[in-house]
C-alpha cells in the first residue's frame, strides 16, 4: 500500500499559519484556520476522443473563522495575504472586523477549542500520479469499446477521477493534518431502437487508487445485458407496490429520509420535522441507521471535519426509534447537543454546513433470495439516478432506471424504466419487514444541500423490502 | 504576472526533449464574493470570499498513419503555485496530452465580439448597497402580503407566512482569456444567486417550499416576484389535499420544468451530442415529430443566445474563445443548425457556431388563459424534477400542484408524474406568453398530454 503524503504546500505554510493564529488569538474570542490543498486527475474516454483534466474538487486555499461577542464570521482567500505573519494577521483581522460590524447578527455560544494534535495518512494500492496516462486512457477506451456494439449500444463513455485530499486545521489549541485519496469511475451506455433511447451505468468508488478500474472492467457484461433489456422496458402502472430496494437505493433512502432530515442546521432553522420525533418510533424494529466518517472506510471517511471537529459515528435510528442528529459546530452549540464532526465544506471558499459522511442502514438477517421469494406482486428496484429529501414534510423521491417485476416470488422478465418512487417517510420505514444480511457502501457522485454545496459522501447498507408508490 | 510565468514555463518545456506544446489556452478567473446567510430576518453568518485560479489547456500534436492528430489536457494553476510547481504541472499536462490522439482541430484566432453585453446595474452601487438591494427585494413580499391580508380582513388573525431562511451570494467575476493564436479578451460580470425557504402554518403543522434564483442585475421586480410567488404557493400547500389517482389529465409544466423540456431539444442539437451519438437528432429532419405521430401540433423555433438580459450566464465568447452570435437552431420543428463546441463541429464537417450558454424558444399558439380553462394538473413545485438529457425520460414527486376539474381549482400535494419528451414532443403545446427561466427566455407554460400521474391518496 502507498501512503498519501501531506501536501508540501500546506506543510510549508504550517509554521506561518501557527504564527498568524497566535497573532490573531488575543483579538477574538475564537479564531481558527482551515487550509486545503486537494489535487487530482481525471481521464475521459468518449467516442472518438480521449482527454485528461482535473476534477472539480481540485482546490487550494484558506478560510479563517472568528468569533467575537458571539458573532461568527469567515474570510476565505486563495493564498495567505501579506508577507510576514504579523502582516498577514493584520490583513485577515481587518477583513474579519469588517464583517463583524454587520447588523442584526445572531450570537452563538462560545466555540470550544479543546487541545488536540493528530494527523492521518490514508493509503492506496496504485498511485494515479505515478501511472502512465496512455495506459489509463487505453484502459478506459477499451472498457468503453467493449460495451459499444453499434447495434444495441450506440454510445458508451468511461471516466476515472482521483482526488488526493490534504487538509490542515490550526487554532490556538488544535493542530490537525490529514491526507487521503479517493477514486471514482463510471461506465455509461446508451441503447437505442428507433427514436427510443435508454441509458444506464455502472459506478465504482472508494478510498482507493487506480486499482478501482479492475472493478469497473468486471461490470461490462451485466451492463450490456441490462441495456438490451431496457429497450423493451415498460412504464409502471401507477400504484403502491411491494418493493425490494438494492443497497444503493436503500442507502439513498437512508440518506434522503433521515440523513438530510437530521442535519442539525435544519433543526436550528426549524426546518426538520425530526425534532418532534426524537425518542419516538419512525420505522420498524428492523431499521437501524448510522452516519459517520469514523467506523467505515469509504468516500465520506476522514479524521476531522472542516471545522476541526474529530470524526465520530452517530447512531441515528436504533430499532426504529429516532435517537438524534448529525451536527455542524454552530447549530450544535446553539442547540446544546454534541458535535458529531459533520461540519463540511465543498471547498475552502464555501460555508460549513451540517452534512452527511457515510450514511447507511445496518444489515439484517434475511437472505436476498428469500426476500424475492416472499414478494407476491412487486418490483426489485436498482440503478438509482437521484433522490431528494423533504425534511419538513417528510416526502421522499427516489428515481431509478431499472425495475424488475416479481410475481409470486419470481422475476417475470418484465422490466420498467424509469421508475419514480415516492412516499411518506415514516410509512416507508415502518413498512420495512425484511432486511438482507449483506452490506455494501457506494460513494460515487456527490451530495448537495438544496441545489448546491457538493460534498463527497457514501451511502448504502443491505437490501430492504418495503412498500412505495411507483409511477 | 502569472500569465508570463506560465508562458515562460511552456517555452522552457518546448525547448526540452519531450513532447512540445503546439497550442495553449489560458483562462484566468478572479472572484470576489459577499455571502449573507439569514435565519428568519437575523444574519446567521457573513462571509467574504476571494478566489483566483488559472485554467491552462495544452494541445500536443502528433502524426498517426500520416494524419495529424491532437491531444489536450487541462490543469488548474493556483496563485500560490511557485515557478517549479507550475512547470511540473504543465509538464504533467503536456505528457498526458501527448497520449491522446484525437482528430486534429484548430483554435480560434483573434476576433472581436459579435455582441456587446450591457453593464450590470450592480456596477453603479457600492458594496453595502448591492447586498442590501438584493436582500430588501427578496424580503419585501413577506411584509406586502401581510399588509394586504390585514387590509382585506382587519379583524382576522393571519396565519404565519414568512421567509424562514435565505442565502445571498453576490460575486464579481473577472476573466482574462488568451490563447496561442492571439485571441485575447477580458470579461467582467456580476453573478447573483439566492436560495430561500418560505413557510406557512397549516392544520398539520408548518409546511415549506424551497426555491432559488440566479440574477445579474439588481432587478427588484424579478427578485421580489421569486419570493412572492412561492409565499403565495406555500400558503396553498398548507391547504393542499393529498392528490388522488388522476387519469387522462393534461399536465401543465411551467418555469424551470418547462425550460428543462425545451433544453432537451437544445442539448440534443449540439455538435458534441450528435458526434458522440448520444443524440438521435439529424440535421434537416423534423426533431419534433415523434415516432407514429401524424403531425406536430405546435411547431417550435429555438435560438441559441449568447446574451439574455438578467441572466448571469450571458457571454460574448464560448470557452474556446469563439465569438458567439445569436443563431436559429430549430425552425418549425426542423433542426437547421448545430451549435456546440467547435472541435465537434470540425469533426462533423459542419460550420462552427460555438457553444452557447443560453437559448430562447418561440411563443406557442395557446394563451395561458386557454390552457388553464380546461381540466388539467399544474404542478408548480416538485421535490426534484429530473429530465434525462439523453433519453428525454422525466419524473418527479409533486410538492404542490393545482388540479382543475373544469369547475374548481384546488391545491394538491404528494404523488408524482413521469413521461418522456421523446414520446410527447409532437403533441406538446406552448403558451403564447414567455418568461425568463434560469438559462432561457421560453414559454411560461407547456401543456403535455399522456403524462403518467401517480396519486398519493391510495395508500
Image (spheres, coloured by chain):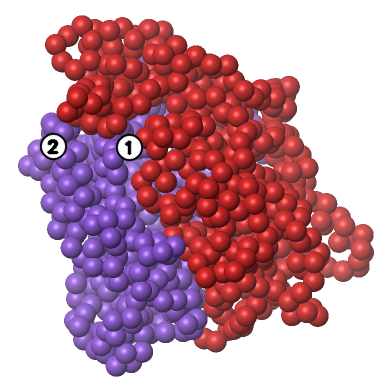
Left or right: A432, with A463 as reference point: right
Report the chain shown in purple: A
Q: Chain of mark 2?
A: A
Report the chain shown in red: B
Q: Name the spot of residue B202 as percent of width and height, x first.
A: 69, 72
- Residue that badge 1 annotates: A55
Q: Name the spot of residue B399 as percent of width and height, x first.
A: 60, 67
Q: Residue at x 23, y 50 (%)?
A: A144
The secondary element bearing badge 1 is classed as loop
- Nearer to the camera, B362 or A275: B362
Place residue A115 in its image quadrant.
top left
Q: Name the spot of residue B325 as percent of width and height, x first.
A: 60, 29
* Relative vertical location of residue B357 with respect to residue B22 in this rendering, above or below: below
Which quarter shows the N terminus of chain B?
A: top left
Place residue A443 in its image quadrant.
bottom left
Left or right: A60, with B447 as reference point: left
Place residue B74 in its image quadrant.
top left
Are marks 1 and 2 in one subunit?
Answer: yes
- Residue that badge 2 annotates: A135
Amino acid at each position: 500500500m502507498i501512503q498519501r503524503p501531506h501536501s508540501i504546500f500546506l506543510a510549508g505554510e504550517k509554521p506561518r499559519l501557527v504564527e498568524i493564529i497566535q497573532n490573531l488569538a488575543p483579538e477574538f474570542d475564537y479564531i481558527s484556520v482551515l487550509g486545503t490543498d486537494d489535487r487530482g486527475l481525471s481521464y475521459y474516454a468518449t467516442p472518438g476522443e480521449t482527454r485528461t483534466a482535473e476534477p472539480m474538487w481540485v482546490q487550494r486555499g484558506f478560510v479563517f473563522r472568528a468569533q467575537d461577542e458571539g458573532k461568527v464570521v469567515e474570510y476565505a482567500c486563495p493564498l495567505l495575504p501579506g508577507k510576514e505573519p504579523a502582516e498577514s494577521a493584520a490583513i485577515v483581522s481587518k477583513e474579519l472586523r469588517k464583517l463583524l460590524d454587520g447588523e442584526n447578527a445572531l450570537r452563538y455560544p462560545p466555540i470550544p477549542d479543546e487541545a488536540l494534535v493528530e494527523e492521518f495518512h490514508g493509503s492506496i494500492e496504485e498511485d494515479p500520479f505515478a501511472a502512465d496516462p496512455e495506459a489509463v486512457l487505453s484502459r478506459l477506451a477499451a472498457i468503453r469499446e467493449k460495451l459499444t456494439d453499434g447495434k444495441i449500444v450506440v454510445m458508451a463513455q468511461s471516466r476515472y477521477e482521483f482526488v488526493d485530499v490534504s487538509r490542515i486545521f490550526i487554532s490556538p489549541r488544535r493542530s490537525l493534518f490529514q491526507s487521503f485519496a479517493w477514486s471514482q469511475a463510471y461506465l455509461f451506455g446508451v441503447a437505442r431502437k428507433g427514436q427510443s433511447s435508454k441509458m444506464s451505468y455502472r459506478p465504482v468508488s472508494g478510498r482507493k487508487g487506480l486499482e478501482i478500474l479492475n472493478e469497473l472492467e468486471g461490470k461490462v457484461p451485466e451492463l450490456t445485458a441490462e441495456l438490451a433489456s431496457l429497450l423493451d422496458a415498460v412504464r409502471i402502472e401507477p400504484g403502491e407496490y411491494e418493493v425490494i430496494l438494492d443497497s444503493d437505493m436503500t442507502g439513498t433512502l437512508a440518506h434522503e429520509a433521515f440523513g438530510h432530515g437530521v442535519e442539525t442546521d435544519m433543526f436550528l432553522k426549524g426546518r426538520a420535522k425530526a425534532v418532534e420525533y426524537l425518542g419516538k418510533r419512525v420505522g420498524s424494529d428492523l431499521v437501524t441507521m448510522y452516519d459517520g466518517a469514523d467506523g467505515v472506510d469509504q468516500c465520506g471517511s476522514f479524521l476531522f471535519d472542516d471545522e476541526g471537529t474529530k470524526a465520530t459515528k452517530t447512531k441515528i435510528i436504533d430499532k426504529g426509534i429516532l435517537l438524534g442528529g448529525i451536527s455542524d459546530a454552530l447549530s450544535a452549540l446553539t442547540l446544546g447537543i454534541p458535535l458529531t464532526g459533520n461540519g463540511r465544506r465543498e471547498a475552502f471558499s464555501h460555508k460549513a454546513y451540517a452534512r452527511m459522511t457515510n450514511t447507511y442502514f445496518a444489515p439484517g438477517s434475511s437472505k436476498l433470495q428469500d426476500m424475492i421469494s416472499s414478494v407476491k406482486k412487486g418490483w426489485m428496484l436498482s440503478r438509482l439516478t437521484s433522490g431528494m429529501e423533504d425534511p419538513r414534510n417528510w416526502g421522499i423521491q427516489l428515481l431509478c432506471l431499472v425495475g424488475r417485476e416479481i410475481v409470486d416470488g419470481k422475476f417475470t422478465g418484465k422490466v420498467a424504466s424509469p421508475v419514480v418512487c415516492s412516499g411518506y417517510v415514516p410509512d416507508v420505514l415502518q413498512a420495512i419487514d425484511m432486511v438482507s444480511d449483506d452490506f455494501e457502501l457506494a460513494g460515487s457522485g456527490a451530495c448537495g444541500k438544496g441545489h448546491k454545496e457538493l460534498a463527497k459522501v457514501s451511502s448504502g447498507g443491505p437490501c430492504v423490502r418495503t412498500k412505495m408508490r411507483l409511477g | 504576472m502569472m500569465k508570463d510565468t506560465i508562458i515562460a514555463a511552456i517555452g522552457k518545456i518546448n525547448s526540452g526533449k519531450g513532447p512540445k506544446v503546439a497550442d495553449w489556452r489560458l483562462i484566468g478567473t478572479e472572484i470576489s464574493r459577499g455571502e449573507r446567510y439569514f435565519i428568519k430576518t437575523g444574519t446567521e453568518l457573513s462571509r467574504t470570499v476571494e478566489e483566483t485560479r488559472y485554467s491552462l489547456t495544452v494541445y500536443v500534436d502528433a502524426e498517426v498513419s500520416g494524419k495529424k492528430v491532437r491531444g489536450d489536457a487541462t490543469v488548474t494553476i493556483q496563485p500560490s503555485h511557485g515557478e517549479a510547481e507550475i512547470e511540473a504541472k504543465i509538464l504533467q499536462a503536456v505528457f498526458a496530452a501527448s497520449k491522446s490522439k484525437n482528430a486534429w482541430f484548430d483554435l480560434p484566432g483573434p476576433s472581436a465580439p459579435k455582441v456587446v453585453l450591457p453593464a450590470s446595474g450592480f456596477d453603479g452601487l457600492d458594496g453595502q448597497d448591492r447586498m442590501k438591494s438584493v436582500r430588501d427585494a427578496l424580503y419585501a413580499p413577506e411584509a406586502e402580503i401581510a399588509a394586504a391580508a390585514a387590509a382585506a380582513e382587519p379583524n382576522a388573525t393571519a396565519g404565519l407566512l414568512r421567509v424562514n431562511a435565505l442565502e445571498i451570494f453576490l460575486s464579481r467575476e473577472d476573466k482574462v482569456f488568451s490563447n496561442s493564436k492571439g485571441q485575447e479578451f477580458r470579461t467582467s460580470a456580476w453573478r447573483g444567486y439566492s436560495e430561500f425557504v418560505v413557510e406557512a402554518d397549516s392544520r398539520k403543522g408548518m409546511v415549506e417550499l424551497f426555491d432559488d434564483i440566479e440574477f445579474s442585475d439588481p432587478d427588484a421586480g424579478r427578485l421580489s416576484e421569486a419570493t412572492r410567488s412561492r409565499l403565495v404557493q406555500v400558503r396553498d400547500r398548507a391547504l393542499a389535499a393529498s392528490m388522488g389517482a388522476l387519469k387522462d389529465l393534461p399536465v401543465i409544466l411551467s418555469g424551470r420544468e418547462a425550460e428543462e423540456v425545451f433544453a432537451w431539444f437544445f442539448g440534443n442539437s449540439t455538435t458534441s451530442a450528435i458526434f458522440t451519438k448520444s443524440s438521435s437528432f439529424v440535421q434537416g429532419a423534423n426533431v419534433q415529430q415523434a415516432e407514429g405521430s401524424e403531425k406536430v401540433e405546435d411547431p417550435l423555433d429555438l435560438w441559441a443566445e449568447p446574451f439574455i438580459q438578467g441572466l448571469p450566464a450571458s457571454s460574448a465568447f464560448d470557452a474556446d474563445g469563439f465569438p458567439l452570435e445569436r443563431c436559429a437552431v430549430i425552425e418549425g420543428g426542423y433542426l437547421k443548425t448545430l451549435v456546440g463546441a467547435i472541435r465537434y463541429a470540425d469533426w462533423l464537417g459542419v460550420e462552427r457556431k460555438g457553444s452557447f450558454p443560453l437559448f430562447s424558444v418561440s411563443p406557442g399558439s395557446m394563451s395561458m388563459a386557454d390552457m388553464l380553462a380546461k381540466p388539467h394538473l399544474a404542478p408548480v413545485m416538485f421535490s426534484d424534477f429530473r429530465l434525462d438529457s439523453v433519453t428525454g425520460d422525466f419524473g418527479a414527486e409533486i410538492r404542490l400542484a393545482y388540479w382543475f376539474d373544469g369547475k374548481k381549482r384546488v391545491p394538491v400535494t404528494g404523488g408524482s408524474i413521469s413521461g418522456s419528451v421523446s414520446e410527447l414532443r409532437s403533441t406538446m403545446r406552448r403558451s403564447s406568453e414567455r418568461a425568463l427561466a434560469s438559462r432561457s427566455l421560453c414559454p411560461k407554460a407547456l401543456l403535455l398530454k399522456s403524462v403518467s400521474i401517480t396519486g398519493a391518496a391510495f395508500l
